[in-house]
Image (cartoon, rainbow, N blue to C red):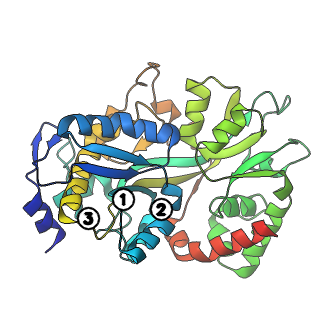
């Protein structure tokens, strides 16, 4: 049975405005996997709570997205997939799709049309980077710094991370090669347009690790998106990288003495996949949820709570003010022209090909 037929056979989905209501031929509980912290809180408010209110379904949150590929591989091997919907970055979605661990999605049949009359595939456009990937947000990995610990000259370049003389103290970087390798090469003189060509070679990888060696003893390595905000709030690091929405929460909502460093912010995509191998009832529930959570209004609603750009073009005009602070959210988006003067475009297809190899090399380097 095709996915579309399975959905039609198990789901009597009707739409009242933008609100999805489902019949009883679906699972009444689902586990949704995401990244935790301010990001999961924004999903809870924009997606989970209204969906549970409309359907009576119980949503269980899991914060294991940073381990999604490894855990889904293990679940598949054991024949026991316990997750229903998983939030992943685009490169991980490509890997999971290529390995047959995620469902293929027909956007125009399974997702809602845009409120502007566009089809889903038109509305998401080039952000549908895999047959299994349902785009949700455009975000960036960027840097924050303690304004009270950087002296009279706040950093303006990502290369401040490698300047221990001007900015002494600990810094935090994500415990993976992605972004760190690119920034290392940029700060070692490699032109932006040449980074991935250089990184493809053994010599280029050695060059990146050599640059990272210069600060290795001054780095706290993080795995969860909430780690750097906490380290900055506690004054344990002078600067650190994390997702721009986490820094927005720290700076604007919590009013911590932290500044945002947008230089060489790395644009990336984040979205949903549905694991392959679910029962018909669980698959139908996951598809029903995805249709609801990725419609025009819902993606715009998430931007009320966190400064990530919605993946649908039709959602952008609906982005308004913060849900509680009443401030305009557009200037806090990574895509705002004032913030995007020197961006780095993350190559998710390149990383889908090289991730496993460089993960192993990175972990080996950390252990040295």
How far is mark 1 from mark 2, CA to CA? 10 Å
Per the rendering, the mark at residue 299 is none
Viewer-nearest of discs 1 and 2: 1
Q: Is residue 148 above or below residue 107?
A: above
Whether residue 261 is visible: no
Query: What residue is shown at x 38% (from left), y 37% (from top)?
Result: 44
Viewer-nearest of discs 3 and 2: 2
In the image: residue 40, left or right of residue 292: right
Query: What residue is shown at x 84% (from left), y 56% (from top)?
Result: 215
Please state, as top left, top right, bottom left or bottom right, where the N terminus lies in the image: bottom left
Badge 3 vs badge 2, beta-carbon distance below 8 Å: no
In the image, 72 versus 198, the foreground residue is 72
Per the rendering, the mark at residue 83 is 1
Labels 1 and 2: the sequence-earlier one = 2
In the image: residue 9, left or right of residue 186: left
Q: Which residue is mark 2?
A: 68
Q: Which residue is mark 3?
A: 105
How far is mark 1 from mark 3, CA to CA? 17 Å
Q: Tell me residue 107's x, y (percent).
A: 23, 60
Q: Tell me residue 100's x, y (percent).
A: 35, 76
Query: What residue is shown at x 41% (from left), y 35% (from top)?
Result: 303
């Amino acid at each position: 049975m095709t996915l579309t037929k399975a959905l039609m056979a198990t789901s009597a989905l009707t739409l009242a405005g933008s609100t999805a209501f489902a019949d009883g031929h679906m699972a009444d509980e689902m586990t949704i996997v995401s990244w935790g912290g301010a990001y999961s809180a924004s999903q809870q408010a924009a997606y989970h709570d209204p969906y549970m209110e409309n359907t009576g379904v119980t949503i269980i949150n899991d914060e294991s997205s940073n381990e999604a590929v490894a855990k889904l591989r293990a679940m598949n091997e054991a024949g026991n997939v316990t997750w229903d919907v998983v939030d992943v970055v685009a490169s991980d979605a490509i890997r999971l799709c290529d390995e047959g661990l995620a469902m293929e999605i027909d956007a125009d049949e399974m997702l809602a049309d845009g409120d502007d009359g566009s089809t889903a595939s038109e509305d998401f456009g080039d952000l549908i980077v895999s047959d299994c990937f349902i785009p949700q947000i455009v975000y960036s990995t960027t840097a924050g710094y303690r304004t009270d610990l950087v002296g009279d000259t706040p950093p303006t370049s990502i290369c401040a991370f490698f300047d221990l003389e001007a900015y002494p103290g600990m810094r935090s970087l994500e415990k993976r090669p992605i972004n760190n390798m690119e920034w290392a090469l940029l700060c070692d003189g490699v032109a932006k347009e040449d980074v991935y060509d250089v990184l493809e070679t053994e010599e280029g990888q050695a060059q990146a690790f050599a640059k990272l060696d210069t600060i290795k003893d001054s780095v706290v390595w993080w795995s969860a998106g909430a780690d750097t905000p906490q380290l900055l709030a506690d004054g344990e690091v002078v600067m650190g990288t994390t997702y721009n929405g986490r820094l927005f929460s720290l700076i604007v909502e919590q009013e911590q003495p932290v500044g945002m460093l947008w230089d060489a912010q790395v644009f990336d995509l984040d979205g949903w996949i549905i694991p392959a191998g679910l029962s018909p009832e669980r698959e139908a529930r996951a598809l029903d949820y995805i249709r609801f959570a990725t419609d025009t209004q819902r993606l715009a609603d998430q931007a009320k709570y966190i400064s990530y750009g919605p993946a649908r073009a039709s959602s952008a005009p609906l982005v308004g003010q913060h849900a509680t602070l009443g401030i305009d959210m557009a200037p806090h988006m990574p895509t705002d022209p004032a913030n995007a003067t020197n961006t780095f475009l993350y190559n998710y297809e390149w990383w889908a090909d090289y991730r496993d190899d460089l993960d192993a090399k990175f972990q080996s380097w950390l252990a040295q």
